[in-house]
Amino acid sequence: MPLDSPLAGVGIDADFWSLRFVEETSENYMVRKDVALPLDVVTEHGVMATVYVDGGYGYAATGDTSPAGIARALERARDWARATARHAITDARDLPRPAPRGEFGAAPAPRMSRREWFDVLAAESSAAAIDPRIVDWEAAAEVRTATHRLVTSAGGDIVQHYHFVMPNLAVTAFADGDAQTRTLNGARGICQQGGTEILARFGFVGAGRKVAEEALELLAAPNCPSGRMDVLLAPDQMILQIHESIGHPLELDRILGDERNFAGTSFVTPDMFGTYRYGSDLLNITFDPTRPEELASYAYDDDGTRAEKVYLIRNGILERPLGGAISQKRAGLDGVANSRACNWNRPPIDRMANLNLEPGTASFDELVASIDDGVFLETNCSWSIDDSRNKFQFGTERGRVIRNGKLGHVVKQPNYRGISASFWRSLAMVGNADTLAVLGTPFCGKGEPSQVIRVGHASPACVFTNVDVFGGAE
């Protein structure tokens, strides 16, 4: 059944039901070492049925979107709801019955043909091969279009259109037993909604040579110094810091213990909301699915809750979790519209969407000038964090020493570590809007069965004091 077709006559005897249709097509382009790899095109199409009955709730998915296929999915979901009602941790009769209506999003412009995509990537690949020490290089992009439709028995019918562009450049240099990799904003860190204007926004065209030069520069660079010092984190490292040590700890289903067997728990507990000092007064974190170019912007989440910008942390104080309608009911806490599924064959769970650090007032030069002894860190390349999302150790691709308020020489293999519960309290300066970048990741994993979903992060550059920094020699 097409996504835009009417659903007259479809339904089931239940307290409430919904149908979430998903159709997505991805095109993956890559030119590696000046060789164009085969185009990879995948189209997914299906529907998830959700049914509330007798206090229980059940799900069933199918790739058969004919009226008969949809009817069978609704029946299976109803049967699951009845079979599990007495074990349900939330009475479905108390859950919302959303009825949103409308159509959101549109096809972007401009767009490129498949040949044009390969031509752009081939040019950047060729530009990266500047030295015999460059041993591997690639230019890649994923272009994805999606249409999601949610129909509910309460009269809801919303259609949301998306178009994503996710380019990347990566270059590896090798000499004397040392290999250094440099990327453009990390592995698919450049990922936004829109069209080919995204390439211009990030200076993708012409970046092949620059990335290669920085990979060679890292070969000749000394290891990052070790010790307690101030750090200036670039936006493409800040997004990882936000993702791992704020985003995941604030997921309400994780706080309630749902992820304990797979992705771990959280050091955050329900009693912390409203009083806990998560960071310094400069820390302001928002859940904001309304910024149109950001990767996880949408009008309604996958349960039909209206998406609005909400503060999670304001002036350093923890205010609310990342919890959708079901988790909010369980915990008795206000949450956000972040009940999301990665595809038609997964039920929605609590996920990050766009999780942003609001900009401050300092220019980049002022951030650098504030540091007497420290390092500027760019572009995440490794991460490790414990199962309560508290103690962490992160590595970046590139660093620059800062001495007496001046940027100095490049250093390689910079790493730092800390504890989420205290690290954010060392936030000393927040960059202004000129330092902010809108980035993200298409690869956030969570859930049983596993779901890999798109997440957006916008952040300025930030200064943290007295951080444990160490080089690759340790």
Image (tube, rainbow, N blue to C red):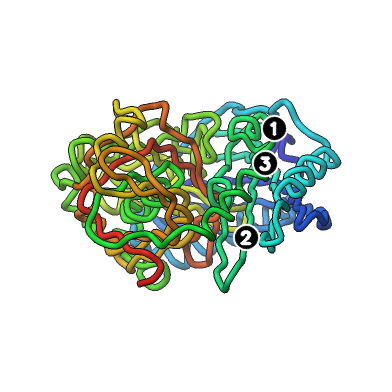
Is residue 219 shown to the viewer in this render? Answer: yes
Q: Is residue 68 left or right of residue 413?
A: right
Query: What residue sits right under mark 2 in the picture?
Result: 172
Query: What residue sits right under mark 3 in the picture?
Result: 146
| Helix, strand or loop status at disc 2 | strand
Most distant residue in the right direction: 115
Q: How many discs appear? A: 3
- Examine the image and state in which quarter residue 61 appears: bottom right
What's under tag 3, amino acid-wise? Ala
Query: What residue sits right under mark 1 in the picture?
Result: 196
Q: Residues within 10 Å of mark 1 (few under 14, many from 20)?
A: some
Q: Is residue 322 left or right of residue 73?
A: left
What's under tag 1, amino acid-wise? Thr
| Quadrant containing the N terminus in the rendered view | top right
Q: Where residue 45 is drawn, which disc sits there? A: none
Taking the spot 57% from the left edge, 59% from the top edge, the residue there is: 181
What's under tag 2, amino acid-wise? Thr
Q: Nearer the viewer, residue 111 or 159?
A: 111
Image coordinates of residue 355 in percent, x first then y, are: 40, 41
| Helix, strand or loop status at disc 1 | loop
Taking the spot 63% from the left edge, 54% from the top edge, the residue there is: 170
| Helix, strand or loop status at disc 3 | strand
Task: Kindly indicate whether the residue at mark 2 contacts the one at mark 1 (C-beta within 8 angstroms).
Answer: no
Image coordinates of residue 113 in percent, x first then y, are: 83, 36
Query: Quick check: 404 above or below 130?
Result: above
- Of the image marks 3 and 2, the number of the one nearer the N terminus: 3
Taking the spot 39% from the left edge, 27% from the top edge, the residue there is: 433
